[in-house]
Image (cartoon, rainbow, N blue to C red):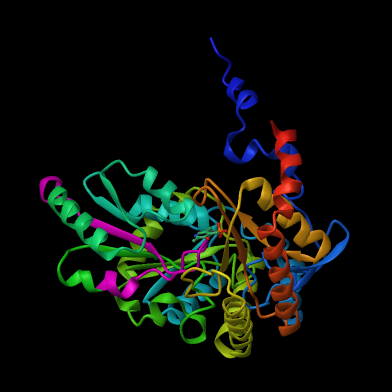
Amino acid sequence: MRDLFDRFYENKGPVGKWAAHAEGYFVFPKLEGPISNRMYFMGKEVITWSVNDYLGLANHPEIRKVDAEAAAEYGSAYPMGARMMSGHTDLHEELERELAAFVNKESAYLLNFGYQGILSTIDTLVGKNDIIVYDVDAHACIIDGVRLHMGKRFTYKHNDIESLEKNLQRATKVAAQTGGGILVISEGVFGMRGEQGKLKEIAALKEKYNFRFLVDDAHGFGTLGKNGAGAGIEQGIQDDIDVYFATFAKSMASTGAFIAADKEIIDYLRYNMRSQMFAKSLQMQLVKGALKRLDMLKNRPEFKAKLWENVNALQNGLKEYGFDIGNTQSCVTPVYLKGSIPEAMALVKDLRENYGIFCSIVVYPVIPKGLILLRLIPTASHTLEDVKETLEAFASIREKLENGTYKRISEAILSAVK
Ligand SMILES: Cc1ncc(COP(=O)(O)O)c(C=O)c1O
């Protein structure tokens, strides 16, 4: 009989197979120093384009002060236990009221983490007779939530309303047989490539089909809509989103998340959502920190304005230099280049070591073979000088990619991997 662990030695998986060459550099890199536009990687200062601190709040002195005071006052334990049992406080309720009002919903509920939170939200919203219809490019947490579902699920082609409609027709037929309902799930902003979900078009389908709409707005919250209230507000259809989700892990520069919906729906979720019923409440320093951050979003529009100044400078600059940045409609800035994985590794190494630029790299199997995606996340803490330096560096590395410099370097890497 095989030992359970045998296959871990034989096959480390599509990313794991590169571990010997990638660990500590391409994967599990250590970015050091205060979170900002420039951090340290292997002792060298780099312009950091891979941190989702969109509004530059992570290291803002007022935020740091509130975080530190809350930690001093409450420690990291309080409150202990799940919300339902012993982990409930006035401040949790206050934050929920503030969040609900901010995103124009009746009620909100805090989640300990975005990932588990949305997974459990999906699990709670549907029963075995219900049908889920979701965008094929959905984030892993949505896919894992759908995996828990015992009933039927259909994917529609990414942001393709015709495909969604076909699947809604299939789902409607199934629902007639099972007596269930339909949940449609999209993201507000797709975090890899930056397109906004077609929330308005999806919402318009409610006139023809009976479904409820869940939106994961991890990247839209704080960056889109009035004061950063999100993609639903930006597209003018917040009322058609039945359950709105956002995480604190990006614009809020913290940990935790929330869902917002009609009061009856939130009440149901509060009493039935396993990730919150059977897990410790969000600790107080995070709750107090989130109240402060939300206050900054509401009352300090300069952070979002600066963010968008940088986004526009970076995205327009890349286009002027002739780079393919796909169809982004958000701060997420993808740059598509053609090349193999080893070429991508050589290119990123050059960017980091010789140009002082740190960005994330995405390759097959996340995107098609032969493409390299460099993903840049502009924030309010970047400067126009950072943008200029980056554009010049990108022009230079593209030339090297095209003249075969990285191919030559990569051949050495490739022979070592084989
Ligand atoms: C679209 C999306 N949803 C959910 C999450 C998970 O959020 P968290 O980091 O709070 O677990 C992420 C990543 O952080 C995300 O990009």
Residue at the image point whose x is 64% and y is 74% from the top: 378
Q: Quadrant of the C terminus?
A: top right
Q: Is residue 219 left or right of residue 391?
A: left
Q: Is residue 254 left or right of residue 350?
A: left
Residue at the image point whose x is 60% and y is 20% from the top: 6
Q: Which is more toward the observer, 113 or 249? A: 249
Start and end of the magenta stretch? Answer: 176-203
Q: Which is more toward the observer, 194 or 33? A: 194
Q: x and y percent of residue 170 in the render?
A: 17, 51
Across the whole image, how many numbered discs are drawn on residues? 0
Residue 191 to residue 142: above or below: below
Q: Magenta includes 214?
A: no
Residue 169 to residue 297: above or below: above
Residue 178 to residue 10: above or below: below
Q: Which is more toward the observer, 414 or 132? A: 414
Q: Residue farthest to the top? A: 1
Q: Which is more toward the observer, 223 or 357? A: 357
Residue 86 to residue 357: above or below: above
Residue at the image point whose x is 42% and y is 53% from the top: 142
Q: Is residue 206 left or right of residue 337?
A: left
Q: x and y percent of residue 216 in the render?
A: 43, 64
Residue 262 in sight in this render = no
Residue at the image point whose x is 31% and y is 68% from the top: 242
Q: Magenta includes 195?
A: yes
Q: x and y percent of residue 304 in the render?
A: 59, 84
Tell me which corner region of the image, top left, top right, bottom left or bottom right, holds residue 161: bottom left
Q: Is residue 402 left or right of residue 30?
A: left
Q: x and y percent of residue 230 in the render?
A: 46, 77
